[in-house]
Structures are given as C-alpha cells and as structure tokens.
Image (tube, rainbow, N blue to C red):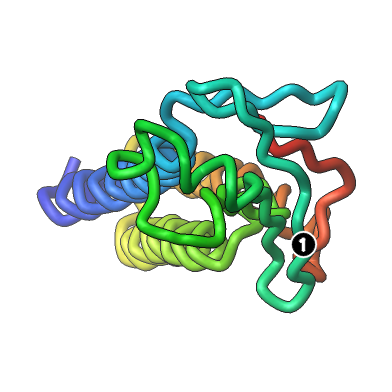
Amino acid sequence: MSAEALLACAYSLALLVFAGVLEWLSAHTHRRSLRYRTAGFEYQADHDVWVCPEGEDLRLHEYDHERRLVRYRARAHACNRCPLKERCTDSDDGREIVQPLDPWPHSEAGRFHRGIAVMLVALAGLVAAAALARNHDLAEAALLLGLIATCVLIARLLLRDLRAHPANFPGQWSPGS
C-alpha cells in the first residue's frame, strides 16, 4: 500500500473525527448554556410555567417569532421584594427566562456548526476520492471506497435534521428540552 493512500486515509479520518468533535462540542455547549440560564428553576410543562427557587411562577410573556424565542417573566413586584433578587436578576421588570423555539440543531448557531461539520465530512470524502483516482491497487481501492462510503453515510446523518426542517421550523417544541 502506498504512503500517499495511507496519508489520504489518515487525513480523511482526522477530518471525520474533527467534524464529530465539533458537532458534539457545539451541541454540548448549547445544552449547557440552556441549563445555565435556568439553573435553580423548574419547568412545569402541565402549566407551561417556570418556577423560581422561591416558588414564584414565571409565566409566558411573549413569543418572539422573528428571533425564534419565547420569553417567560415573573411579576415585577414579586421579584423586587425577593431576598434573592441580587443573585437572580438586576431587572426591575422581573426575572426573565428566554428559551429558543428551535431545538438543536435548528438554532442559528446549530445550523452554522452543523454546516461546518458537513463541509468537513465532504472534504474528507473529496480527499479520499482524489486518492482513489491516483491509487488503483485493490487494497488501496477497497480502503478508500470504504472511507468514501463512510463519509456519505455520516453526511446523510448530519443532513437529516436540516432537510427535515428546511425553513427552520421544527414540528414539536417544549421549553424543557
């Protein structure tokens, strides 16, 4: 097996690994960000409210369709007299929780990172295809064709969610997700 084919395989595999790490890290960061914004608060789906650690309800305040967000807000007078206000909010209008309408990867950041991951997978497939065009040994061809098939499969998996909701409107949304 030629060194060129082995290097092309190694480079393609490195691109696939990097795409996977990028996808995982961006989704993890998104989930962590959502958890941080609601730390200490509990979502009650049956009433569509968030409950603060002091027991105050944050009720649905606004759907922002342009920014694809939903806002929940506590009553201002309840927050302003709360002993935990300094650690919770600096707003005199009451604590607000903002949740995205779109789940991962349908947010703008999610679609951006998913697009980069898809491009990395496509580049890995392109590198393997170029190596296949130059190396015709049976073992090399089998290895490179397997790598190309893997790239196609991974790209299809990454694109599945983006194709299912091309207009950025997912079918089902729940604030606790």
Residue 139 location, x and y as percent?
A: 34, 35
Residue lying at the far bottom of the rendered structure: 66
116 left or right of 69 in image:
left
Which quadrant of the rendered structure holds the N terminus? top left
Q: How many labels sit on residues?
A: 1
Q: Is residue 142 visible?
A: no
21 left or right of 63 in image:
left
The answer to which of 127 and 44 lies nearer the viewer is: 44
116 left or right of 149 in image:
left
Residue 110 location, x and y as percent?
A: 52, 57
The answer to which of 72 and 169 lies nearer the viewer is: 72
- Residue type highlighted by circle 1: Glu
Vertical comparison of 55 with 120: above or below: above
The answer to which of 84 and 136 lies nearer the viewer is: 84
Residue 4, by quadrant, is bottom left
Which residue is at a point 55% across and 52% down the rendered structure image? 94
Say which element carries label 1.
strand
Residue 37, by quadrant, is top left
Residue 142 location, x and y as percent?
A: 43, 38
Residue 140 location, x and y as percent?
A: 32, 43
Which residue is at a point 37% across and 41% down the rendered structure image? 85
Which residue is at a point 59% across and 52% down the rendered structure image? 76
Vertical comparison of 96 with 153: above or below: below
Packing grade of label 1 (10 A; few <14, some 14-19, many >=20) is few
Which quadrant of the rendered structure holds the C terminus? top right
The residue identified by callout 1 is 62
The answer to which of 33 and 153 lies nearer the viewer is: 33
Q: Is residue 158 visible?
A: yes
